[in-house]
Amino acid sequence: WFAIIAAFIILSATLYLTDKISPNDYKRPKFSVAKAAFFVYSSFVMSKLKSSAVKPSSRIFILILWFASLMYCTTYGTNYFFLLIRTNPNLPFTNMQGLYDERDNYELLMVQNSTEYALMRAQNSSSVYWKLAASPPTFVPSIEAAANIVKNSTLPGRKKPIYIGDELSVNYYAAGVCELKSAGKGELSRSMHIVLSSSLDKNLISNINNRIQELSDRGELEQIKNNYWSVLLCSASENLITYSELTEVTIDQVAGIFMVLAGAFVLSFLVVAMEYIGYIIGLQVQRTRADPDLEFNKAYRALVTSITPTGVYVKLHGEKEFIPNQMLSPDASKGMTASDLQISCGSMIEITYLGNDPAEGYRIFHRRG
């Protein structure tokens, strides 16, 4: 009873903690007292089974216990797999709304008095851009400073730095460094493009276009592109985080699960190997054991310690010996058991030592009628 109560308390506490720390989301709680009690009961009953079930009802009952235990072990065991799964090193969002939802884990960086900051502050108060700008962010003097902070994570505390800017500047520095990731493609730049385009004078736009055309006609435009964009060692599109990238699970993330399974397989193999080695050693000891206290074909009195459907266990000279049913009866063909022969636990019977079995090595006894 003490073992049952202790098992119930420990199991209940374990399942309750699993329910609290597991990220798996269920519509109803995973832990319940009834499940824990049934789990302990089924395990206890199965541990006490010493004989095979014969009646169909008994077999069905044992199958129910086994399947219930297997179900609970699988259900609660898989809830701990998240401890073995490495998180995706990329950002856990693909847009500005996702960043706002995760803002407690990140330090938002913006350039002081930048156009994008003014644009975000000018949005409606219900907009995610306005909420991010009102957080408030940490201001840095330039985009270069923000990129260096993001790359080197040189902020105090555990929060990860994130730079918020227009798409062109983000793509330029992310691609230039090649180690930075970007998210929210085109979200802020589209709004900025609309605002800036509407605010520019038409004559200024015409002059800019004419200047670009002149550079192109003189062959200087490509030279300018090469000078200013030669630092782009990788494509900006390769640095963009997509939804499929966040949802897929790579082999290195779940490697811990396979390592545990491999360790369990190796340990199981070692246990089986050790048991087999122990069996071989014990068998060899039995075969080579010379017991001067026992003489061939000599009668001895032994104490019956336990009775099973297949025979009885007796204690002889401090050793526990097994005598099968066919060696208890004078006529082995009748198939009589210990109860048929009126043999009970604690009674003394007279047995004859017939030597050791040549194959298995155990000692053979026959009850004298």
Image (cartoon, helix red, strand yellow):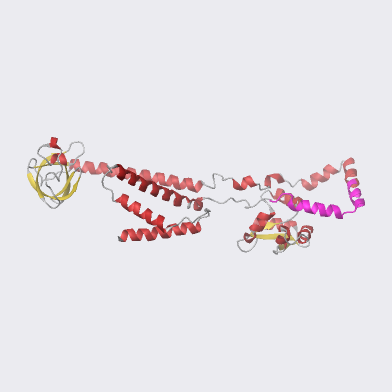
First to last magenta residue range: 183-209
Q: Which quarter of the figure is the N terminus placed in?
A: bottom left
Q: Which residue is drawn at 38% across and 61% down?
A: 9
Q: Does 189 lie within the magenta span?
A: yes
In the rendered image, the residue lying farthest to the front is: 57
- Would residue 82 appear left or right of 350 to someone viewing this image? right
Q: In this view, does 106 lie to the left or right of 292?
A: right
Q: In terms of image quadrants, where is residue 366? A: top left
Overall secondary structure of the magenta section: helix
Where residue 326 appears, x then y in whole percent?
A: 15, 39
- Looking at the picture, how far across and down is residue 282, in whole percent? 23, 44
Image coordinates for residue 88, horizontal then vertical, percent:
58, 50
Taking the image as shown, residue 329 lies to the left or right of residue 274, namely: left
The picture places residue 89, in percent across and down from the top left corner, at 60, 51
Residue 234 showing in the rendered view: no
Question: Is residue 198 shown in magenta?
Answer: yes
- Residue at horizontal 28%, vertical 51%? 48
- For the C terminus, the image quarter is top left
